[in-house]
Image (cartoon, grey):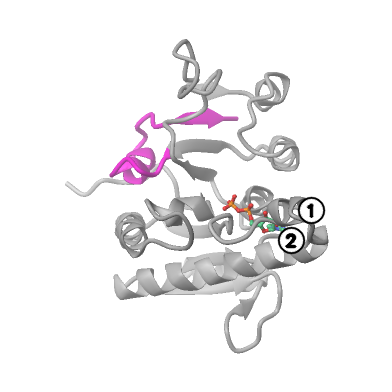
Amino acid sequence: KEKSSNYKRILLKLSGEALQGDETFGIDPKVLNRMALEIGQLRGIGVEVGIVIGGGNLFRGQALSQAGMDRVTGDHMGMLATVMNALAMRDALERANISTRVMSAINMTGIVEPYDRRRAMRHLKDGDVVIFSAGTGNPFFTTDSAACLRGIEIDADVVLKATKVDGVYSADPMKDPAAVKYDTLSYNEVLEKQLGVMDLTAICLTRDHHMPVRVFNMNKPGALINIMVGENEGTLIK
Ligand code: UDP
């Protein structure tokens, strides 16, 4: 029997690091291909998929600025990095026969479509995966904030933040054996306990607009589809 999804439209946040796999820089094609298959499974059960992609595998404004570069220039480089990741992701998705659009918050005629909310919604309704690149288009923001912003704008049912760990823990499970995993958290608990799941801008945005966020392990095969059919993967913040 065909599984049916609890969600009609999702916003998936993929960090740049997630695309890196076991490499130390750049993109691991094996990881891209596996993600494309998992995203294809979502399309297979009719879920509309928006993706915001990070750039931390290539450049981060903060790291560049710590090394002496002007922060805004570094952030511009970080945003351009997300566009490269988006192109690689589209390539992998289209090789898996999943029709995909890339939109960018920074206009790049001839390479990607400019971000336009209503067009994005039409593409999603038509069944295309839409990748939102270049973050918010502004320095001093993160792609986590961009994911929450786009998720709210396109009226997604949930923002899914893909990470390398099983969810949100009370402490770093690598360092503290007593760390416990939370199944659910409120936005205010995340803020009060300073859990560092996402930056403050992102948490406040989702709290003010009642957008649920699920943090889950993308390295676990099948996690995405499990979430769609209602299984308890990772941590739900609501
Ligand atoms: N960035 C930015 N504005 C945005 C989103 C991203 O300036 O709205 C820059 C910022 O320098 C950031 C980099 O792009 O460090 C890459 O994004 P991020 O660090 O969020 O990527 P991730 O950690 O998800 O790989």
- Give the x, y percent position of residue 212: 58, 37
Q: Is residue 11 visible?
A: no
Residue at point 44%, 56% (across, down): 19
Nearest the viewer among 32 and 225 is 32
Q: Which numbered dot is residue 140?
A: 1
Which residue is label 2 attached to? 75
Which residue is painted at 47% across and 41% down in the image? 163
Crowding at mark 2 (Cα within 10 Å: few <14, some 14-19, many 20+): many
Q: Residue furthest top?
A: 178
Highlighted range, magenta: 217-238
Residue 169 horizontal side relative to residue 99, left or right: right
In x, y percent, where is residue 126?
A: 45, 71
For ligand 1, tell me if the residue under mark 2 lies within 8 Å: yes
Residue furthest to the front: 67
Kindly state the secondary structure of the residue where label 2 is placed. helix
Q: Confirm whether the magenta stretch covers residue 179.
A: no
Ligand 1 within 8 angstroms of badge 1 C-beta: yes
Outermost bottom residue: 110
Q: The residue under label 2 is which amino acid type?
A: Asp
